[in-house]
């Protein structure tokens, strides 16, 4: 499947965090294909820790195969702006890697050495239209002492002349907090007019997009979201297959209070390595499973 199927989902990832001078713990629960996984985040002033465990096998549903779900090791990431460092940990193997924070951008020479090239478009004219409609329903609900609004965002990907992409619709139904939830160690929403972004892979030419926005974009903290993706996929034999995928997220715990400083340090006895193992990839896994798992891992790194 084309990577474009997933870039819209990134818009639903909760990137902002409620402020707390005494520390904050948030537990997110994600559910798809009937399988649930949790992510725990700890924030204290300018430090952050995230614990999670990924899984692979969900992509097989597209091929009509059993899910064959397999989980990655228990992983964690620690962000320490005060130290200028970020740590990725494999909690099962007792290993960790360290990198500068904020990440240093690659130089032109480093990018070329890794095979990165400037974006190339298949046409000078847009071949894809992305229409986003945002509607505040007017409903309000309490989540952990915060009043959230009910907002439904519909994103339609419409192929134009010269496009090789499939039509797609994604509906993001969520509840969002009104207040500014940014903190020093979290992602800061840029000021000014909202922008657009997407994820691509490889150096092949990509389709140029034009964006049409209707309604005020929602940029608050998501307490709950249900993302429904509908697409008619073109198979290798040229036939179309209708596909619907539902991904849900909800905050199941939000606690304010003092945090153990040890949460933001590498445990004693952990061994530093160049790169931790972040996935189990047995040889009997299908090529699809491997690609799916690597894609999810790369997305996780984008937001760490």
Image (tube, helix red, strand yellow):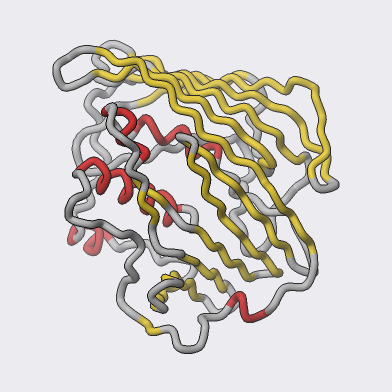
Dividing the picture into quarters, in which one does residue 33 lie? top left
Q: Quadrant of the N terminus?
A: top left
Q: Position of residue 251 (x, y in %)?
A: 67, 46
> Would you say 219 lies left or right of 162 here?
right
| Depth check, front residue: 298 or 64 | 64
When asked about the image quadrant of residue 64, the answer is top left
Q: Nearer the viewer, residue 208 or 277?
A: 277
Q: Residue at x 65, y 33 (%)?
A: 218
Residue furthest to the bottom in view is 269
- 3 shown above or below 304: above
Image coordinates of residue 199 in percent, x first then y, are 37, 40
Please tell me in which quadrant of the rendered image residue 5 appears: top left
Height in image: 252 above or below 113? above
Whether residue 169 is situated above or below residue 65 in the rendered picture = above
Tally the marks. Answer: 0
Query: Residue at coordinates 80% horizontally, 67% vertically from top-left?
Result: 257
- The reply, left or right, for residue 148 in relation to residue 74 is right
For this orientation, the residue located farthest to the left is 237
Q: Position of residue 153 (x, y in %)?
A: 60, 24
In the rendered image, residue 299, in percent from the top left (x then y), is placed at 41, 49
At horizontal 52% and vertical 83% (from top left) the residue drawn is 267
Residue under the image location 68 percent in, 20 percent down: 135
Residue closest to the eye, 56 or 237: 56
């Amino acid at each position: 499947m084309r990577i474009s199927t997933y870039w819209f989902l990134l818009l639903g990832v909760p990137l902002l965090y409620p402020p707390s001078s005494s520390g904050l713990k948030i537990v997110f629960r994600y559910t798809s294909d009937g399988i649930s996984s949790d992510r725990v985040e700890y924030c204290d002033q300018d430090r952050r820790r995230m614990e999670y465990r990924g899984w692979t096998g969900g992509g097989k549903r597209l091929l009509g195969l059993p899910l064959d779900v397999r989980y990655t090791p228990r992983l964690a990431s620690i962000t320490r702006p005060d130290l200028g460092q970020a740590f990725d940990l494999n909690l099962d193997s007792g290993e960790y890697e360290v990198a500068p924070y904020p990440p240093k951008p690659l130089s032109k020479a480093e990018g070329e050495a890794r095979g990165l090239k400037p974006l190339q478009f298949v046409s000078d004219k847009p071949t894809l239209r992305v229409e986003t409609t945002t509607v505040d329903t007017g409903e309000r609900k309490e989540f952990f002492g915060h009043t959230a609004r009910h907002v439904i965002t519909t994103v339609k990907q419409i192929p134009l002349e010269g496009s090789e992409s499939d039509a797609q619709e994604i509906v993001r139904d969520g509840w969002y907090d009104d207040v500014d939830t940014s903190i020093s160690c979290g992602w800061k929403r840029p000021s000014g007019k909202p922008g657009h972004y997407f994820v691509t892979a490889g150096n092949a030419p990509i389709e140029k997009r034009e964006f049409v926005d209707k309604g005020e974009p929602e940029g608050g903290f998501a307490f709950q979201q249900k993302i429904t993706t509908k697409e008619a996929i073109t198979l290798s034999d040229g036939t179309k297959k209708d596909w619907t995928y539902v991904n849900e997220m909800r905050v199941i715990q939000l606690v304010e209070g003092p945090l153990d400083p040890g949460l933001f340090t590498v445990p004693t006895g952990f061994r530093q390595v160049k790169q931790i193992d972040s996935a189990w990839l047995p040889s009997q896994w299908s090529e699809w499973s491997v690609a799916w798992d690597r894609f999810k891992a790369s997305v996780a790194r984008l937001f760490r």
